Image (cartoon, rainbow, N blue to C red):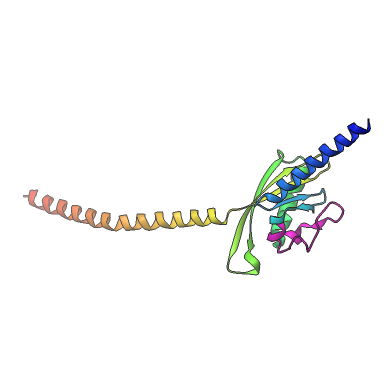
């Protein structure tokens, strides 16, 4: 019986260790919120986003932190908390997405765009929040839109000249045909 308990404990410890390695290795910031919207777990990427170092703060279920500590934009923090509540209260299908922007390292000129995917984690009202940075995708979409606008403008200019030339040629031919 004791051997079974020791084996079960080792298996549980191995699973916890694997989960911890996996959780800390993700490049996207990941938060676990409790039913009150406070952060009970955060991976290193989330701590970096918050401007915190691993040795500066311990985020765990014993010492939950307000989400505003992790996400500096108050409106974004409130929106994530509200969507998290909707997921927990069953007003959503278990997954919701929200988009927000943060100023990069306190800069007012450069913002980083994020998409938050929020899922119910368990029956205790905890939610998993994965923040995926979409700054690059947004910049690429903006550049594509600018390129298409410039290209269509550049194509319109010669086409307008050709059309005007054809209209003038057609008008001359009409004049010759009239008696």
Q: Position of residue 116 (x, y in %)?
A: 66, 50
Q: Magenta includes 66?
A: yes
* Residue 89 seen in the current view: no
Q: Give percent across and percent down for residue 36.
A: 82, 51
Q: Look at the magenta stretch and give its main secondary structure.
A: loop
Residue at figure coordinates x 78%, y 40% from the top left = 15
In-front residue for pair 53/42:
53
In magenta stretch: residue 101? no
Span of residues in magenta: 46-70
**Residue sitting at 78 percent across and 43 percent down?**
88
In screen coordinates, is 151 left or right of 84? Answer: left
Residue at image x 61%, y 69%? 108
Side (left or right) of 109 relative to 122:
left
Residue 150 against residue 35 in the figure, above or below = below
Q: Is residue 165 visible?
A: yes
Give the image location of residue 26, x and y in percent: 67, 49
**Residue nearer the viewer, 67 or 81:** 67
> Which residue is rendered at x = 89% and y = 36% of the image?
6
Quadrant for the N terminus in the image:
top right
């Amino acid at each position: 019986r004791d051997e079974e308990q020791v084996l079960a404990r080792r298996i549980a410890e191995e699973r916890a260790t694997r989960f911890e390695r996996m959780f800390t290795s993700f490049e996207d910031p990941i938060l676990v919120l409790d039913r009150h919207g406070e952060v009970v777990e955060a991976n290193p990427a989330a701590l970096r986003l918050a401007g915190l170092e691993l040795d500066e703060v311990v985020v765990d279920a014993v010492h939950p932190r307000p989400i505003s500590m992790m996400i500096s934009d108050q409106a974004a923090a409130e929106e994530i908390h509200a969507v998290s509540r909707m997921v927990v209260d069953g007003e959503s299908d278990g997954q919701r997405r929200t988009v927000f922007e943060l100023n990069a390292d306190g800069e007012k000129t450069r913002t980083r765009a994020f998409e938050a995917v929020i899922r119910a984690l368990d029956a205790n009202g905890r939610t998993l929040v994965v923040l995926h940075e979409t700054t690059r995708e947004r910049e690429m979409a903006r550049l594509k839109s600018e390129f298409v606008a410039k290209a269509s403008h550049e194509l319109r200019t010669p086409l307008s000249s050709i059309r005007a030339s054809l209209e003038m040629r057609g008008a001359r031919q009409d004049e010759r045909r009239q008696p």
